[in-house]
Amino acid sequence: MVRVKRMTWEERWVPVLMVCVLGMALSFPGLSWGVETRVAKLGLIAPMGHPVQRASERLAKLVAERTQNRLQIQVFPGGTLGGEIDLRDGVSLGTVQMAGVGYPILNGMVKEMEILNLYYLWRDRTHMMKVINGPIGAEFNQRVRTRNVEVLAANWQQGTRQSLTKRPGRNPKEFNGIKIRVAAGVPIYQDLWQAMGAITVALPFPELYSALQQGVVDAVELPLDWMYHGKFYKLGKYIDLTSHFFYTNCVLVNTGFLQSLPVDVQKILKETTLEVGEWQTGQVLGQEKDLRQKMESEGILFVETDVEAFRKAVQPVYKKWEGRWGKALYDQIVGTQ
């Protein structure tokens, strides 16, 4: 008589459970079964509601979706991880994986990039982006890599910087005596504003609001969206249309962190950061007229200025700092068509 061995509970049900798990994996391909999730902190100085903050959240959402959560980006706005220089250096050291900062702030890593801080350098935005997206920008980015920093995208354009003051400044003479905040760690800004007639006070961005509130400074220079979303306009009375500077932000990532990601995740991160940069630029440039109307409705007075007088006033600063970048680079930038 042949005795039939009875199957144990495990022998009967384990195969069934394995089939169920396999079926779920095939039915929900977006789930990352057994795949490591990497997390990147993205530091910003932009406050909540600003286009840079909203675009960063959009970036985080799209990257999570497109990598099936293999890469998750946590956004820290409002300078909670430090000012721009702190963020730039944090990415280099690897204490912060990612950061959104002004592209010219990379002058601390590549000295020739100081030229990007000159006021009235660009003919228009097309000129600026041709330089940054062309051979000059490519060389800058390559040199930044030696500091363990990768520029994922440099197309997050910011608005035209104007001057928020407590008394109007229509020309360099009227700026005489006005205390204006300039970014800490960028001495060329002090020279530029002193040439334009102002007294300069160097401060990191997270300290700016309280400094204006307490009278440490009585003027700031920012794009309209930064004035509005940061509520700086509530502390001033005039916006002088000096139109002295426009620039683009860049998104940085620590090179070691980037290279530790799967190749396809690296590709998704780079492509998505560029894509969101175009969206962010549209948001920034598309709202300037509306922001002006909103601030005017709350009592802010917009003042036309003698832009040509300001442009002429800063020319000696160009010559003073020329040794930093060299005449050849200046001529190459000016000659870019």
Image: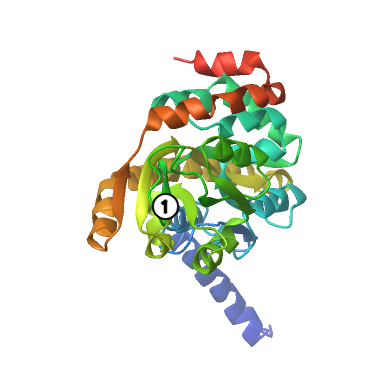
Disc tally is 1
Tell me if residue 331 can be seen.
yes
Snapshot quadrant of residue 37: bottom right
Coloration of the structure image: rainbow
**What residue sits 41% from the left and 37% below the top?**
171
The correct choice, above or below, for 309 with respect to 164 in the image is: above
Along the line of sight, the residue nearer the viewer: 136 or 317: 317
Tell me if residue 121 can be seen.
no
For the C terminus, the image quarter is top left
Along the line of sight, the residue nearer the viewer: 237 or 33: 237
Residue 127 x/y as whole percent: 44, 23
Could you classify mark 1 by the number of other residues whose Cα lies within 10 Å: few (under 14), some (14-19), or many (20 or more)? many
Residue 335 x/y as whole percent: 50, 13
Residue 49 x/y as whole percent: 40, 62
Disc 1 designates what residue? 164
Along the line of sight, the residue nearer the viewer: 30 or 209: 209
Secondary element under disc 1, as helix, strand or loop, is: strand
Q: Is residue 301 shown left or right of residue 2?
A: left
Q: Is residue 299 shown left or right of residue 325?
A: left
Along the line of sight, the residue nearer the viewer: 274 or 201: 201
Snapshot quadrant of residue 6: bottom right
For the N terminus, the image quarter is bottom right
**What residue sits 61% from the left and 52% below the top?**
201
Residue 167 x/y as whole percent: 40, 53
| Three-letter code, disc 1 | Leu
